[in-house]
Amino acid sequence: MPIDQSESDEDSESIPGVTLVVPMETFRLEPVTAAINDRREVDIHGTYTRLAEAATVARAAGDPAADALQVLSNIASYHFVPQNRVEPFQPLAIFSGRRTGVPGDLLADQIEILAAFSPDIPSPALRARISDVCRLRVPRNAAAGMRAVSAYVDCVTMVLRGEAEFAFEKKSAACVTGCELLIRATIVARRLGWDRSDFDPLRNVISDVSQMAVDSNDAWGFVHIAPVNLDNVIWNPKAVADAAERLALHGQMVGDHFGQRELWAVAARAYHRAKDAENENRCLIAAAETYVGNADARTDSAMAQASFLNDAIQALRPIPGTVQRRRELQDRLNATQPNIQDEMSIFSHEQNITDLVESVENVVSGKHFPDVLRSLLTCERSPDPDALRKEVLETGYGSISGIMPMTVSDSQGRTRFKAPGLNFNGPPDEDQVRFLMNQHDQFRRQIAVAAKLNTIRRVIMNEHYISLAMFVPVMQASFFVPHDHDLIFAKGAYRFLAGDDMEAAHLLLPQLENSLRHVLGLNGIETNRINPDGTQEEAMLSRLLDDYRDPLQKIIPAAMLVEIDLLFNFRGGSSVRNELAHGKMGDGAFWSPDVIYATWLVLRLACVPSFRVWPDIASVMYSQGCH
């Protein structure tokens, strides 16, 4: 793994490039030049591992080249976020307040040396990365920016010509990796002056990749490259729209409703850019109708049909002239919903995963990403609430903590809950029972997070390439995820797997309450009430878990609902919902076992319904670059 960066480095060992400057002559040593001499290396994905291994060998041999190799490998390890104009290179991993390296860690003198060295790097992928980092740190260094753009173009051009391929045997220049390189290149080029003739090769390669995708009927490739084309006005918008429409109607797209939807959305965006509202709306309607196609294809599942029909209705709602069609779909939805309760009474998935970290690693290491993701989502089960209640009552009367009243305080020291203690002379107080159940179950959650969730996430970060786009189809296929919330859930999943538990928690935890209302609505159960003054009020989480417990138990396992109550709602527990919603969580709380587990639990609720179509989702993930 790359070097961890912590808040205090006083006692840490020297880190080349970060705490000490590696001189130019070290970068000129033979072990360094040999390690970066692959002129066909167009993907940075494997560069870090190769350079890190070379650094280890050099350090073991006492070779000073180890320092230069470590600097280069650390830079190669940065997590690439090309759409982020401010922080395109982010930590590869963040855990418990510690992170891997970022460009801001590098010393200014080291940046100057790297900028001078970058023109001599034969590997186009590494030359692009080093040059881009140097320009990012020193924005006035236009020469470094020009080299970065040129190197990005070289990488994509070599793949386009068949002279090289991206990692994981991706041979199309229009794949996710190629388009990400072009996106970053355009951002850098615009900072330097987009109209300069120096960037003609960049504009030409975007056009060539777009045309290649059209000529080869590469629908997903065109979905990837078309936004780059549109954003930079490479083609006339109507030409982009025409190409997207032709691909959407091509015979190979029959049955691929998700792919068709993406293409119609591209066409609608292009017509919007061309200020052609009539054709924009026509394409938006066609995109919405693909949801109906999804519903037609799912005769095996009333819940899936209801979810897709609801998505179609919501997609049509802002489009003029669709009132009659929405009514037709609403009638069909109303006819489908009564069949949902029999089908979706409960969902449960068995998984034979041990508690030992080594065993978990053996189960998931070397597997394909969709299989590893599924293992992550099913590696732990909610405990049986009746068995848990029985156990805490049997042990509670024999312990001081069970008998004595206790006070639960929040992070600010304010009393949040008072546990009354067990009563020997009458039935147990239910709040005390819930308090003990939560305390008892907290140990299980800690083991689950430490031995399973974090272990599998580490394996994913070490062995797999992931992108935000991979999680979108998972969320779109889930009845738990409301329309227009796909990206929120997808980004939450993406950040959770990247180890950024703070961002993942903020994205996913607030979605639980609304999704519970959503699934009840899909079952024909209204959750809002009219107040005496005529205003309407949605049921909050506590009322959903109390007043709507019976219908929810027909959709979500009772054990999981009890777990939700103890984690999110019960004030004697972690009270995750209130602590997050009211801004009371401190920085460290987001990496606590309960918050990580709660985030995973919401992610599990969102993804498990998609298991019915997991092979199809896996195929989409493979098309977007996972392995």
Image (tube, rainbow, N blue to C red):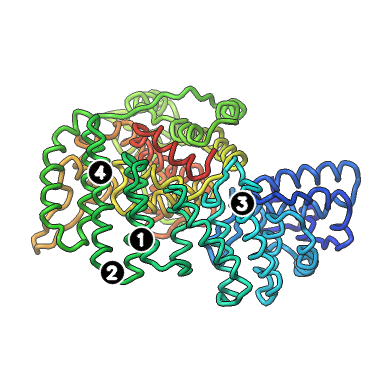
Question: Which mark sits nearer the N-terminus, 2 or 1?
Answer: 1
Expressed as whole percent of the image width and height from the top left, the position of residue 62 reads 91, 45
Alpha carbon separation for disc pair 3 and 4: 41 Å
Amino acid type at circle 1 is Ala
Left or right of 273, for residue 548: left
Q: Check disc 3: other Cα within 10 Å, few if <14, some if 14-19, many if 20+.
A: few
Disc 3 is placed on an element classified as loop
Q: Nearer the viewer, residue 434 or 559?
A: 559
Instruction: Tell me whether the residue at label 2 lies in contact with that at label 1, contact meaning CB atoms closer than 8 angstroms.
Output: yes
Q: Residue at the spot x=29%, y=49% of the render?
A: 482
**Which mark, residue 308?**
4
Q: Is residue 41 visible?
A: yes
Question: In what quadrant of the picture does the C terminus appear?
Answer: top right
Alpha carbon separation for disc pair 2 and 4: 28 Å
**Which mark, residue 276?**
2
Left or right of 71, for residue 140: left
Q: Which residue does the numbered mark 1 point to in the structure image? A: 241
Disc 1 is placed on an element classified as helix
Q: Which residue does the numbered mark 3 point to in the structure image? A: 161
Disc 2 is placed on an element classified as loop
Amino acid type at circle 4 is Phe
Alpha carbon separation for disc pair 1 and 4: 25 Å
